[in-house]
Amino acid sequence: MSKSTKESGVNENQSKPVCSKCNSTENVISIVYGYPGDELMKSAREGHVKLGGCCVSPDSKRNWCKKCSDYV
């Protein structure tokens, strides 16, 4: 039997991560690392991605819930 959505962090019917607090997939966006260009800045302002900074480590978070303002 597979893990539940809250345990795995991924909705089995979709490939998009699920927020463990609000159970949303619609409000989860990717965190993008590195120096942002103009298009990426625009995308971040529009709420399509979250900027994660220039330093990336193995434990860097990959997703953000806009509704809960927390890492997924």
Image (cartoon, rainbow, N blue to C red):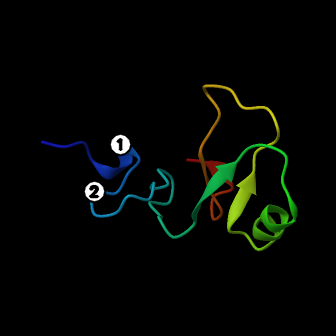
Q: Residue at x 77, y 74 (%)?
A: 46
Q: CA distance from mark 1 to mark 2?
A: 9 Å
| Residue 66 % position (x, y) | 66, 63
Is there a contact, CB below 8 Å, between mark 1 and mark 2? Answer: yes
Q: Is residue 7 left or right of residue 71?
A: left
Judging by the rendered image, the residue that carries numbered circle 2 is: 12
Give the residue pinned by disc 1.
8
Q: Secondary structure at mark 2?
A: loop
Q: Position of residue 6 (x, y in %)?
A: 37, 48
Q: Residues within 10 Å of mark 2 (few under 14, many from 20)?
A: some
Residue kind at label 1, given as amino acid type: Ser
**Residue 31 point in image, percent of width and height:** 67, 50
Q: How many marks?
A: 2
Among the 4 quarters of the image, the one containing residue 33: top right
Residue farthest to the left? 1
- Name the foreground residue: 29 vs 40: 40
Q: For the N terminus, which image quadrant?
A: top left
Amino acid type, label 2: Glu
Name which residue lies at 85% across and 58% down. 37
Name the residue at the bottom extreme: 46
Q: What residue is at 28 percent from the left and 63 percent from the top? A: 13
